[in-house]
Every structure is written in C-alpha cells, then in structure tokens.
Image (cartoon, grey):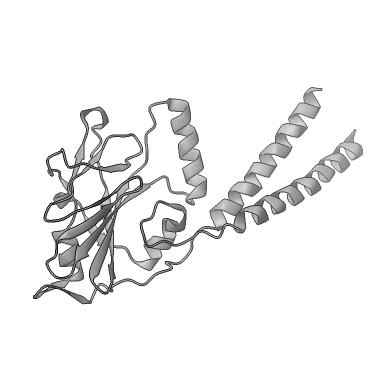
Amino acid sequence: MLIKIKQYFIRILFFLIIISLGLILTGSSKRAYSLVSLDDKLSIGQVNYATNELAEKYLPQVSFSSENNEPNIEKVFYEIIDLKEQIVINYYFQWSSEKHPNIVINLADKIWRFVYYRFSVSDLEFIQLNLDKKDGNVVLAKTKNSAMNFKNSTPCFSVKSWNHEFSIDKSINCSGNSKNIELSYFDGSNYERFKMARRSQGDFKTKDKIMNYPFIIFLALLASYYFRHLQKDYNNEYS
C-alpha cells in the first residue's frame, strides 16, 4: 500500500513539474501597443517635454497606511502613449515581493509567483494617468481596482493591503517618497522579462496567449501517461 501511495505521489509531482515548466517557458509576450520612444519630445500646451521629464513631472505620490507600513518600492517603470488629445502615462511600481500575513499562504504565493513569472517573485502594480494635451491636467486616473475622472485637481494614491494594490483617495494628503525612487523607461526587454501579459494592466493591454494553458495541460497529461507506463515497466522488471 505504501509503495502505491509513493508511486502516485511521484506521478503527481511529475505532472506538476511539467505544468511548471510549461508556465515558465510561456507568457513572455511582446508589448501589443506602441510607445513614445525615450528620445522623443512631447508637447503639452506650449511646452515641450522630454519623455523622462514628463514622467518625472507626473510621478504619483503614494501614501501607506499605518497597518501596512511597507513603502519599500524598489523602482518605478514608466511608458508613455501619445493619443490625439491626450497623453497616457503608465507607471509600474515594483516591490521585491508580496508578503501575505499568513506564513503558509505567503510561501505558496511565492512558489506560484516564482513559476508563473519565471523565477521572479517581484510585484508590479500600475497607475495610469491620462493627461489633457491642452493644459496638462490629469483627467483620468486608473489602478487595478479603481478609476476616477479629475478636473483641476490632483489624484492621490494609497496602499492599504499586503498585495500593494493602489486606491485612489481624495481624502488623503498627496505626500510620499515616490520622488526619491529610481524611475526607468519600461523597454521591451523588461516588459517581456516581467511577463506583463500576465500582470495587471490599464487601458492598453497585452493579452496572454490563453491557448498555451490547455496545450500545457495536454502535454503534462501525455507525459504523465508515459511516465506511468515507465514506472510499471520498471516495477515489473525488478519485482
């Protein structure tokens, strides 16, 4: 009986390893939309801005709740999309990882992220700002779970949960340390490396290739089927 349990356990482990390999090898899709390049200039009203200057000017300030005092943002990536009447800036705030309060769930989450995002447990959360080209005002702010229109006011953002999801909050003071964080242009190589097609995105999205998933499961089942027969042949030979 113990031998059979061991055999089933090895088969399940083998199946999960094949699934993990499939997830690791997929998901690095190229960006599906065009950006303003790092060398381009952008006009707002009568003022011209370099790409990095505009990103620095509108970099959001983030406040943290006392219960979630974890402001250790490692870096902020940015990308800029030039539309007819608006300029869209997407900021991606990077943390080294998420930290669930429950130790077991936290460990399971890190293992999952390590596989799903190919050896990376980094957490990236986005803030999207839409700017009016005429006056430079923010007319729309968007995060994973919220969106808000603005007129002649500044959006404020807060983090109140362990998974760093942003909230748009008019009741807080727009003060934080974002200005001291490294700001980097989100080039194609980093976009693919972080598997952004599998992460939260704003209005401009890159879709993950969902047909990869049934294909991965099919290969895992097929490989497990042959592995089962190899086990049987081995047992018959040495029993």
Q: Is residue 136 above or below residue 180?
A: below
Left or right: 169 as drawn, with respect to 81: left
For the C terminus, the quadrant is top right
Q: Count up the numbered dots.
A: 0
Which residue, as the protein is rendered here, is positioned at the far left?
Answer: 46
For the N terminus, the quadrant is top right
Q: Nearer the viewer, residue 222 or 174?
A: 174
Q: Nearer the viewer, residue 119 or 26?
A: 26
- The x, y position of residue 64, in whole percent, is 21, 36
The residue depicted at 47 percent of the width and 49 percent of the height is: 119
Left or right: 134 as drawn, with respect to 76: left
- The x, y position of residue 148, in whole percent, is 25, 50
- The x, y position of residue 82, in whole percent, is 27, 72
- Which quarter of the figure has residue 230? top right
The residue depicted at 51 percent of the width and 41 percent of the height is: 112
Q: Is residue 155 above or below residue 84?
A: above
Left or right: 72 as drawn, with respect to 165: left
- Which quarter of the figure has residue 151? bottom left
Which residue, as the protein is rendered here, is positioned at the far top?
Answer: 1
The residue depicted at 24 percent of the width and 61 percent of the height is: 130
The residue depicted at 71 percent of the width and 52 percent of the height is: 218
Left or right: 239 as drawn, with respect to 27: right
